[in-house]
Amino acid sequence: MQKIRLFKPSIGKEELKNIKKVFKKSWLGYGPMVAKFEKKFAKFIGTKYCVGVNSGTAALHLSLLCNDFKRGKKVLLPAITFSATAASVLYCGLKPKFVDIKKEDLTIDFQDLKKKYSKDCVAVICVHMGGHPAEMDKIKKWAKEKKLLLIEDSAESCGAIYKGKKIGTWSDIATFSFEEKKIITTGDGGMICLNDKKKYEKIKSLSFHGWNIDPWKRHVRSFGSNNKFSKHWNYEIQNLGYKYNMNDLMASIGVAQLEKINSFNFKRQKILKRYLDGIKKLKYIKPTYPYELKNSSYWLFSINTNYRDELIDYLKTKNISTAVHFVPLPLNKLYKKYKSKSLKNTMTIWKKIVSLPFFPDLENKKIDYIINCLKSFDKKFN
Ligand SMILES: Cc1ncc(COP(=O)(O)O)c(C=O)c1O
């Protein structure tokens, strides 16, 4: 069997068609395509506002930054997540407070969250790990009581519905990632979704050098006989901003991807069903998540086994790519000093998890080949 990748973006002629339109206009930077993608994405998720940025990391950074939290305050977040979730906290001069995860689904443990809370906490970031929804209903209610800003890091989920509400609408601010491996992609990219107009305006400014006007608006105002905008070239720098904006080239891919998102998620559900049926009788290999396929948007197919490293080595010999999502953050040099007590689940479960190839265009024959390899591995221990 030829090499089977872990992730692969699903891109085609629709994306190319949109890219061509942008080329024809010769406007690749921040422009009307970004606005179009933002509008469509806001409608899809169900928030009033969206700001397109150049990564999920930038989205997280600005979601915290727009609140002007006092430096040194604490942000609660799960101990297992991608590094950017915690980096965004440090970028803002805040301190990460790591919360244990539930071993059943790797999302933030609500009981431990309540224990880890202290008066100097200003925000909580929930992560829909691998696409499995965090317990947003309980967390939302509690965060409101504690007056904490609630952020949904939805980088690994897009289009899922949890308890009748879209992922991305449970929080004060939700962030998405469109890097090449995610549910939909723009090559690299991200989105910030929210309902608060003031914060939306601040985030928009922060995402483009802190200006009070975006470069497309300035461009449009530079033509015509309308003197209303006589100083069209002028802008005011209102905030210490960043160069985090999305551009029209990225957005053109995003618009085409968004049209396909429901079919992507449907294909992902079908693949998961095939995998889960295939491995259900195995003794030493079990699914990491309690995959609930209806209305889902899973990003990972992850299994857990006490023989993780042996399995990874074995699958390597079979040309099957694997990964571990993720090594706990407090085990990394940068985050050691923030390690908190009682991260019991975190420190045990990560040693057992393996992510397997999973993307919408993964063919049945490859899935069956992977299942057969898992079966032969499992048999070795019987
Ligand atoms: C949970 C989580 N948060 C944030 C990010 C960062 O997104 P990006 O790579 O687009 O910066 C990722 C993915 O890479 C992620 O998985």
Image: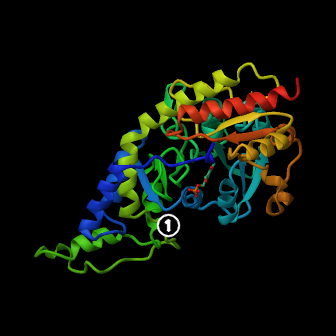
Residue 366, compared with residue 232, is above or below; it is above
Q: Check mark 1 vs ligand 1: CB closer than 8 Å? yes or no.
A: no
Residue 275, compared with residue 195, is above or below; it is above
Q: Residue at x 20, y 79 (%)?
A: 230
Q: Residue at x 48, y 58 (%)?
A: 187
Point out residue 17 in the picture as x, y percentages from the top left corner: 29, 54
Image quadrant where one finds the C terminus:
top right
For label 1, the SS is: loop
Q: Residue at x 39, y 77 (%)?
A: 236
Amino acid at circle 1: Tyr
Horizontal side of residue 19 vs 308, given as left or right = left
Of residue 252 and residue 46, the one placed in the foreground of this image is 252
Horizontal side of residue 60 vs 224, given as left or right = right
Point out residue 68 in the picture as x, y percentages from the top left corner: 59, 62
Specify how the rendered protein is coloured.
rainbow
Of residue 211 and residue 322, the one placed in the foreground of this image is 322
Any part of residue 141 in sight: no
Residue 115, compared with residue 246, is above or below; it is above
Point out residue 55 in the picture as x, y percentages from the top left corner: 53, 59
Q: Quadrant of residue 127?
A: top right
Any part of residue 212 in sight: yes
Badge count: 1
Point out residue 301 in the picture as x, y percentages from the top left corner: 64, 36
Horizontal side of residue 300 vs 373, given as left or right = left
Image quadrant where one finds the N terminus:
top right
Q: Residue at x 22, y 72 (%)?
A: 221
Name the residue tied to disc 1: 244
Of residue 329 and residue 42, the one placed in the foreground of this image is 329
Q: Residues within 10 Å of mark 1 (few under 14, many from 20)?
A: many
The residue most toward the top is 281
